[in-house]
Amino acid sequence: MSSRCRIELFCAGFVMLAACGARTTQAPPASTNPAQGVIGSALAPGLDHPLITIDPRAAAYYDNADAVMTGKRLYAQYNCSGCHSNGGGGMAPALMDDSWIYGGRLEQIHQTLVEGRPNGMPAWGGKISDPQLWQISAYVRSMSLPATLDAQQGLTPSQLPAPVPRQVDEDAGWTPVPGTSNDYTSLTPGPA
Amino acid sequence: MKKSMIAIAAFGLASMTIAQKVPDPVPAGEVFAREAIGHALAPPTPEAGHTAPSSANAPPEDGQWTMPSKNYASTRYSALDEIRPANVRQLVPAFTFSLSVNKGQEAAPIIADNTLFVVTAYPNYVYALDLTREGAPLKWKFMPKPQPASQGIACCDVVNRGGSVSHGKYIFNTLDGQTIALDVATGKPVWRTRLGNINLGETMTMAPLVADGKVYVGNSGGELGVRGWICALDENTGKLLWRAYNTGPDADVLIGPDFKPYYASDRGTDLGVKSWPPDAWKIGGGNVWGWITYDAELGTIYHGTGNPGPWNAEQRPGDNKWTTGIFSRDPDSGKARWFYQFSPHDEHDYDGINEQILLDMPFQGAMRKVLVRPERNGYVYVIDRRTGQVLSADPFGPVNSSSGVDLSTGRLQVNTEKETHLDHVVRNICPTASGSKDWNPSSFSPRTELLYIPHENMCMDWLNMQVSYIAGTPYVGAEVHMKPGPGGNRGELTAWDPVRRKPAWSVKENFPLWSGTVVTGGDVVFYGTMDGWFKALDARTGQLLWKFKVDSGIISQPVSYRGPDGHQYIAVLSGVGGWSGAVVSGPVDPRDGSAALGMTSAMSDLPRYTTAGGTLYVFSLPH
């Protein structure tokens, strides 16, 4: 992420933005139409790069320590922990790793909470207030942050969630930068 | 930015090494000695007779394997004896078949009329293979297309424990709560019956029992506040004949004047309501996700009931009837005849759903009609199956959550030191939540008179947490971390002598045994391990005779049959998963020990040993 890009994001303030970097010279064709919703695909027809969006409703939940701590409480109260454990999963996918089926940006997680997903994720839209859904989303987004993983004390992860820096979602995020993956399974050693 | 990237990479490596360490075993001094807590009403009298199932419950060998339990007695004994200790080293694969599903495969292959049937984990494909042709080609495949969302309410992987063949139909359940009968010749449905509602958290994973013109099935969902039931369907039409709930008023439980439980604690009116806080029975579990057994001799069915919900027992004071127990019922009406509760007010998730083996056994100098239950709470129970009286209860693995069964009242003596509490971690509870033994069935040989129990050696730390009921979501209220039991071996195969109430021999395994066993007329016991070994032991000594490494861990039910060529075959499914294997087959991160209901803590090293898979293996001697 270049600083130029960050300034652009700050100044722009419109609904949806193209990915940052050298490619921002190319205008996003139809992405300014809010009716399109959250972009969930890494494939953008007619472009040579993925589009990303930052939902303006998400803005308040970045860099917000209160949001992730409140989200942690709600995550337990609404039984999210029953399926996703403390981020390690079980009945449902792990959330503390870097593998996302439906996208791992804050607005994508929020969308998953609102709409549900076909393989067993309930639809919580209208059942939990929208600000609370954003707080839960912020906590879930925080689980895989290096700062959160690093803060783990004892056996239970995700207990000291770090606030979600806005810049982590300004990266398109579809392809991990080489050498930055925390995908432990790719390095699974054999029996001792 | 670059600096933080490097930090991410460094942390990724560090967390891997920290979190994948399996906890130290519980010290041997923290559990009770078997002799100290095992009890029987009378000393053993083995000279009084031979232990074996009756011919009504275990008909003569026909070379087939038409139901997961082999016969009504549930001996899982094949009298075929071509494969023997002397030649088993020569076993080779005859053919294999990919199941196209890489989730936990818990089913038994079914063999009838020279066709092999198998049902997979979700999406519950059914395959029929023609054993009369070279390579056993596919006759048909049926795809029931269960609702995908059912995957999200299955507590412990999306498993299926198998189907049965009866009167030209292959009958099985789907994860989303259907019972389906297929025409064995065409694979087309004869009938489909929907019984479960996924929006209430109901799934079906058990193997239907087909007997006496009826199909007996039950629901899963004890971790989602699902009220447990058992149903009987008409085998020819799939129509519901009766449904009995395992919590609630007597009218729902089908308790009437014929109900004569042996112990006083089970007598009274509407105990399924009164032994709960107000309305808690409506979301109280007691599911029938394990084994139902038909007693052709006494005209009775027996079935266990699962754990009460939520796991946090402080939210449900009382005995929580009729959970974690066993019912005897009239097959025609469903009316209860007797009940016995293994773990009243269960505090440790000790479901009572394991297999019951129906035997005629010498006791107190005379032959008795008994059922033998290697139970999740750690005891082998021998129960008089006419009355429900417990004749003996002995631990077959490490136990400290209780200190024996009081045989005058039938009540489990709970160890108060291992009772669970809100906001307080209780450490080193043995056995663990999945029990000394989970669903995976034992086998019994009338030749050796031994029960071959595949089981676990694990303990746990437990923290109760307040939980609210939200329909269709988990209702657990506990954080669990499992760990190896004394000695560090997480699994064990014990050859148990039910008459003398002690092991004849046992074999330790690194991982918990999650496969069933099969024993043969050649005195060979077969079982699989979670790290992918399929093994043959001498049934009399436990000596390892042969092993074969398959593509993925084994958690299924091996069987033995006679092929169209007259030779003996051994069939088993690979495909690790289930509760214990979710760390491989499921979307689980081993850095969270509490993941998969606490199993991940004890199983975080399994991904080093095996990967997800799903294959049918069939072995025979070269011929």
Image: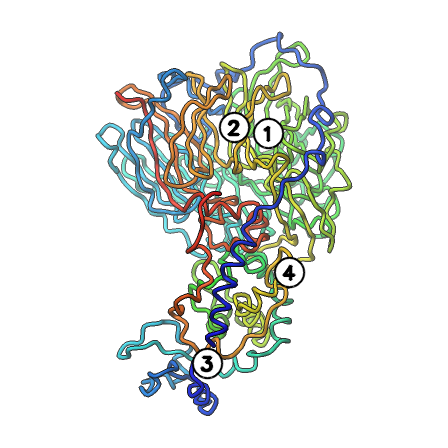
SS of the residue at dot 2?
Answer: loop
Q: Residue at x 35, y 36 (%)?
A: B616
Picture layout, residue B30 above or below residue A173:
above
Q: Chain of mark 2?
A: B
Label placed on residue A153: 4
Give the CA distance from mark 4 to mark 1: 39 Å
Give the CA distance from mark 4 to mark 2: 41 Å
Name which residue type carries label 3. Answer: Ile
Q: Chain of mark 3?
A: A
Looking at the image, the residue that sits furthest to the top is B47
Give the CA distance from mark 2 to mark 1: 8 Å
The percent position of residue B239, horizontal first and vertical second, equals 45, 41
Can residue B332 be seen by looking at this rendering?
no
Residue receiving disc 2: B442
SS of the residue at dot 3?
Answer: loop
Residue receiving disc 1: B374
The percent position of residue B213, horizontal first and vertical second, equals 44, 30
Q: Nearer the viewer, mark 4 or mark 2?
A: 4
State the image quarter where residue A37 is shown. bottom left
Give the CA distance from mark 1 to mark 3: 57 Å
Q: Chain of mark 4?
A: A
Name which residue type carries label 2. Answer: Ser
Q: Earlier in the sequence, mark 2 or mark 1?
A: 1
Name which residue type carries label 1. Answer: Pro
Label placed on residue A54: 3
Colour mode of the rendering: rainbow
Do the residues at discs 4 and 2 belong to one chain? no
Give the CA distance from mark 4 to mark 3: 32 Å
Q: Nearer the viewer, mark 4 or mark 3?
A: 4
The percent position of residue B586, horizontal first and vertical second, equals 46, 51
